[in-house]
Image: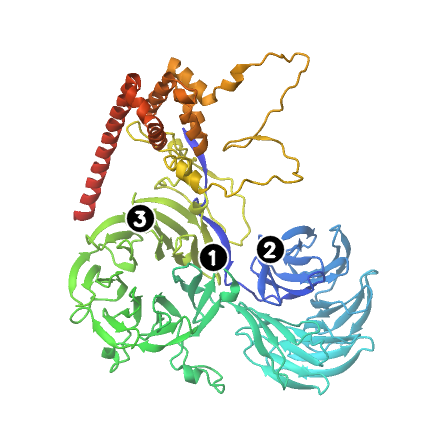
Amino acid sequence: MTAGRKKGSALFAGYRGLGLYSNHLPHVLRYHKRHQEFYLVTVVGKCFHTYNVKKLGIVAVSNALPEDITCLAADRMLVFTAHGNTVNAFARNKEIVHTYLGHKADVHLLQPFGDHLISVDSDNVLIVWDTQSEEEYTQISFDKTLFVVSAITHPSTYLNKILVGSRQGSLQLWNIKRSKLLYTFTSWGSAVTVLQQAPAVDVIAVGLASGQIIIHNIKYDETLMKFQQDWGPITSISFRTDGHPIMAAGSPLGHIGIWDLEDKKLVVQMRDSHSTAIAGVTFIHGEPLLVTNGSDNAIRIWIFDAPGGVGRLLKSRMGHNAPSTKIKYYGQNGQNILSAGQDGTLQSFSTTHDRFNKSLGHGSFNKKKSKKKSVQYDTMKLPPITTFAAEASRESDWDGIIACHRGYLVSTTWNYQKSSMGAHKLEPERFHKDRALNVHATAVDITSCGNFVVIAVSSGHIDVYNLQSGSHRGQYGTDKAHEGPVRGVAVDGLNQITVSTGADKFVKFWKFKSKELVHTIPLNFSPSSLLLHRESGMFAVALDDFTVIIIDTETRRIVRKYSGHSGKINDMTFSPDGRWLITSSMDCTVRTWDLPSGSLIDCFLLDSAAVSITMSPTGNFLATSHVDELGIYLWSNCTLFNLISLPPLPSDYEPSVVMLPGACPVEDTDVIEVDAEVEATEYESPEQLENELITLSLLPDSRWKNLLNLDIIKKRNKPKEPPKTATSAPFFIPTVPGLVPRFAEAPVENLEEQSRVVNLGVLAQKSGFYVQLEDGFRSNNYTPAFRILKGMGPSSIDIELRNLAPEGGGSLIVMQSFLQMIVSILESKVDFDLAIAYLALFLKLHLKLISEEPELMKEATKVMEKLEETWTDVQTMFNQSLCLLTYLKSALL
């Protein structure tokens, strides 16, 4: 018998991406009248992000498209995007409301035009759409040999007219309503890259591929002024509208030119505003703020409040402009992720809000020389970080991060609080005389106290340094720790044992203080990395045969071995409790192994291999970085908010592709066949696990724990004065007193049939519990009576037990029945705590009467015997369990 189980990850669900802000497409600014606020829209791969300009905080993330967005535009209501030959309109910055189909080639230009949208594809076809009906309004085809459309804009106050630029350098003015060419402007001998409306009517700024900017009056076909930038083609143009005649122009080199239109001269060169090409520049209307974005994955807002027209950086959001090489959670709160990128920077990304992100900068041999303004090209920069270790315990005292750089022997320290490179560059003295050796640092680790750092190099040496002073504190081994490159090193949580592994196929245990070799474990294959979980004392070693072994530092034995990957294992991470080991490989899979059972419990496939993974110290997120991906992706741990069964996966399990968070979800209807015995069904706990065990009730302690002290509680809570009745009380439906609120039944008044004879039986009315005890004495079934008592509050229980005595209107038979009910509960071993509490209150109230009546004494003796028998069995099981636990804690297995 088989059951269908959906492919994918049962353990992790895509949550969001971090560190993604912009790509090569220009941004779009929108103004919200009701909010009276500007919003910034940037493209990130297959979706776009919306930020408020005031705080530069993310407001919305759109639904993902099947392909990367190639063009972006927006009007006051909708955001338009193009991917391939399809154009979409988004409402509320998130969901697609219109789709425009009709292009046969890829769309590369979009221009909102009132209630219409203009789109141009690579076949040189211009289509005008009705935005609401999605119908094609008109279509214009251009001859590719004469006019290839490269830019488009709508001149202000020009009704039904658009201005189109070409790669041939000429401009054409078209009437869209009539589909008629009105005028052709002569070519400037270079391709038109940008068309931007100036604040003055009839004036258009034309950016050319030659770096020239033409300020042209299209009404009189007259050039007003020309500017020349030597940084390549003009990528974007914008004008200030706050009373200053200033124009900004972007370039492919990341520089921005600020031009004075009155003096017709260059005012400021904002060099290296972005590390790559400027995608878009826009002045905010009526404010001295310039918004820029580039393909370096950065958004920056500049303010022009200084004399001389120089802009200074006001706000920014930036991530890596090259893929990450290593990521790791920093601190114990699980809110910050350290990321080292191929761009050479070390950055911290917050999982709560982007405003807490910060960059620790780029590694440098000499920070002072690198910071000099005269330095045009920094030759002191260090190569990208390959691996790093971090410890937050002494972050306020000295540096808490140590990093290895690609191909370099020097290891650098970093300070998280100062957001900068640290004070020390750690390098072994033995290599000072001969630096021509091809030796580089391969692995690092910081002790849990934050005082020491262990650095392993490719020559086989392992050195220890003091992190506060940077001084050398010794090395492991007389000459070398390993005969070959060291692949991994780690120190346990108490600074007692250091574990290392190298290409010589050995795992070695060293005493941390004396540096003596304690134990050696030979391996069948060369290791590639090592990861220690300090709390459990387990560490994982990834081997070159794509397997992972788990070694216990206490017993110094291999306790687990996992195989299943078909590519190099890139990274590993433990869950906070040490129960799971998560591995990523070049086979594009992420696998989760359960250490207690030794089995694979989760596996999913990705489009690009995960280069580095890290698990949150709180266990709520798994973070991954991928090949050719700039961002860090968070995956939610589903076991924290769902009841999930994780049966072992079969050895021939074939995972399906899971999209990265923020990517377009693909409907997956594939299922695999698994045994019905391991089908993930919700577990329902039985009322009683075993007949030999006693089961406690699920009632709160307040319902039974204070029964013996009820009179003291009532005396303490007695009001000082009687409650005052309200003069005009509102209407309430009468209720019956009790824990569960119930409305009182309306009395039936039938005056005709009402008898005038007084019924004295009403004065001696029996309660429901009393009646059920009488029935139980005859039928020997006390379940209904106990159910009624279980639903009462402490005061009601006290009254019911008091009324069981003859002086309270009860009888000896009912008291005998109550004791028999307690015996039946003890025999069933269910609700053991309630039975003891009710018995204690009964004895407190009626102990004298019980001692005087032989029948009650007989039943009380049965209760005592049954209670002693039950407690003896439970105490025996407790002693057995405690004995076994003591043996497991003390014995060396």
Residue beneath label 2, please? Answer: 62
Residue 194 position (above or below residue 670): below
Which tag is nearer the camera, tag 3 or tag 1?
1
Comparing 546 with 644, the one in front is 644
Dot 3: few (<14), some (14–19), or many (≥20) neighbours within 10 Å? Answer: few
| C-alpha gap between disc 3 and disc 1 | 26 Å
Measuring from the top left, give residue 243's x and y in whole percent: 73, 79
- Work out whether residue 71 can be spotted: yes
Q: Disc 2 residue type?
A: Ser
Q: Secondary structure at mark 3?
A: loop
Q: Which mark is residue 563?
A: 3
Q: Is residue 110 or residue 742 the one in the foreground?
A: 742
- Label 2 crowd bin: few (<14), some (14–19), many (20+), radius 10 Å: some
Residue type, label 1: Tyr
Residue at x 43% of width, y 44% of height: 10
Residue 679 coordinates in the image, percent (x, y): 41, 35
For the residue labelled by badge 2, is the local secondary structure a helix, a strand or a loop? Answer: loop
**In this rendering, is residue 217 above or below 735?**
below
Look at 20% across and 61% down and name the residue there: 508
Q: Are marks 1 and 2 in contact (CB under 8 Å)?
A: no
> In the rendered structure, which disc, 3 or 1, sits on the residue that comes first in sequence?
3
Q: Earlier in the sequence, mark 3 or mark 2?
A: 2
Instruction: Give the residue at the far front of this rendering.
Output: 721
Q: Is residue 54 left or right of residue 458?
A: right
Q: What residue is pinned by disc 1?
A: 633
Residue 83 in the image: state x and y as whole percent.
62, 56
Reply above or below: 230 against 806.
Answer: below
Gap in angstroms between the C-alphas marked 3 and 2: 40 Å
Q: Secondary structure at mark 1?
A: strand
N-terminal label among 1 and 2:
2
Disc 3 residue type (three-letter): Ser
